[in-house]
Amino acid sequence: MSRFNSEINWQSVIDEIAEEVQPLLSEGKVADYIPELGKVEGSQFGIAVHLINGDKFETGSANEKFSVQSISKVFSLTKAFSILKDDLWKRVGKEPSGNPFNSLVQLEHENGKPRNPFINAGAVVIADCVVTNTDNSLPEMINFIRELSGNKTIKMNDAVFQSEKQFGHRNAALAHFMKSYGNIDSDVDEVLDFYFGHCSLSMNCNDIARAFLFLANHGVHPINNRKYLTPSQAKRINSLLLTCGTYDAAGDFAFRVGMPGKSGVGGGIAAIIPGLLSMCVWSPGLDKYGNSLAGVKALELFTTKTGISIF
Ligand code: GLU
């Protein structure tokens, strides 16, 4: 893939994409099952591309903060994986779910072991792993994300946090259900506070693109030079992003885009190309699967126009 890199004008590629997705910006629907998220103006759009050599490109509202939601599950998974190593997979599976991200049904069939770390049940188990094995888990997690993104000002949006907590009955049900199977060690409320806490962080496209760079560089962050994961662990997280990172549409996303990626119901999608770049697109209007409608299209256009994907 490096054969083509020097010929690509990244800035014009993302500017063209921003232009081409304009007609789609009114088509998606902003998530409102967390009422606070429903207040966001749906037609916004931004992209940030960070190359591992330090070059950065942005277009549109790339510095506008939004709710990271499920994108943050990648950071908690990174933490849990580096603590528990392969023992983590005794608690959570590695298969796409084929069910909605907050489904209770599958959990019962599978005796309280969630299919993968990115469906809500899986992310709640991951949250438990972090909470059980670290002190001051949430402040530590926020510091970890600040370090990855190089932005010390990142913080939770308290209104989103309260809204998630108040309307998080399904997540609470998942957590209690898994506790009944012995797959949650800590106190359920403590685990949920940690989970809602990291989901309610506000970040912008540049923050997220930079934070994901270690996954594009075999576990070592190319800007701060810290090693967060082994190359094998980074490979495994990227594989999970490809197969499970975009809800029940991961197959369609892989088909159209060809990059490992993680979406959130705040409308962000982070995606990487190992050895080359990390990027984040944001547009709050979602498709029926919960992925940013214009965001998926933008990533599809990105790999089409550059001719670069993981394949
Ligand atoms: N905190 C959200 C929830 O638990 C995350 C949703 C998402 O972005 O997938 O419902």
Image (cartoon, rainbow, N blue to C red):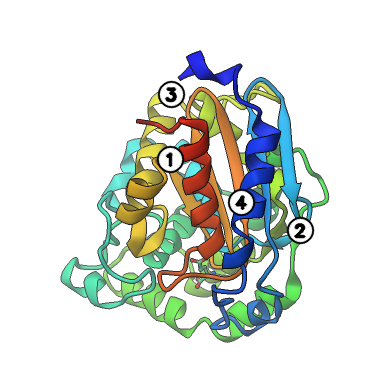
The N terminus: image quadrant: top left
The C terminus: image quadrant: top left
Disc 3: which residue: 231
Residue type, mark 4 in image: Val
**Distance of label 1 from label 2 (alpha carbons):** 28 Å
Dividing the picture into quadrants, the one containing residue 116 is: bottom left
Q: Position of residue 86 (x, y in %)?
A: 33, 37
Q: Is disc 2 surrounded by few (<14), some (14 to 19) or many (20+) residues within 10 Å?
A: some
**Distance of label 1 from label 4 (alpha carbons):** 13 Å
Disc 2: which residue: 155
Q: Is residue 207 above or below residue 287?
A: above
Q: Is residue 61 above or below residue 239?
A: below
Task: Return the disc, 4 or 2, that comes first in the chain's sequence.
Answer: 2
Which residue corresponds to the image point at 61% horizontal and 74% vertical from the top-left?
A: 26
Residue 266 is at least partly visible in this image:
no
Task: Return the disc, 1 or 4, that comes first in the chain's sequence.
Answer: 1
**Distance of label 3 from label 4 (alpha carbons):** 25 Å
Which residue corresponds to the image point at 52% horizontal and 70% vertical from the top-left?
A: 286
Disc 4: which residue: 281
Mark 1–mark 3 contact, CB under 8 Å? no
Dividing the picture into quadrants, the one containing residue 65 is: bottom right
Mark 1–mark 2 contact, CB under 8 Å? no
Disc 1: which residue: 259
Residue type, mark 3 in image: Pro
Looking at mark 1, is its residue's CB closer than 8 Å to ligand 1? no
Q: Position of residue 157 (x, y in %)?
A: 74, 68
Side of 73 relative to 105 (left or right): right
Q: Is disc 1 surrounded by few (<14), some (14 to 19) or many (20+) residues within 10 Å?
A: many
Q: Secondary structure at mark 1?
A: loop
In the image, which is nearer the foreground, mark 3 or mark 4?
Answer: 4
Q: Secondary structure at mark 2?
A: strand
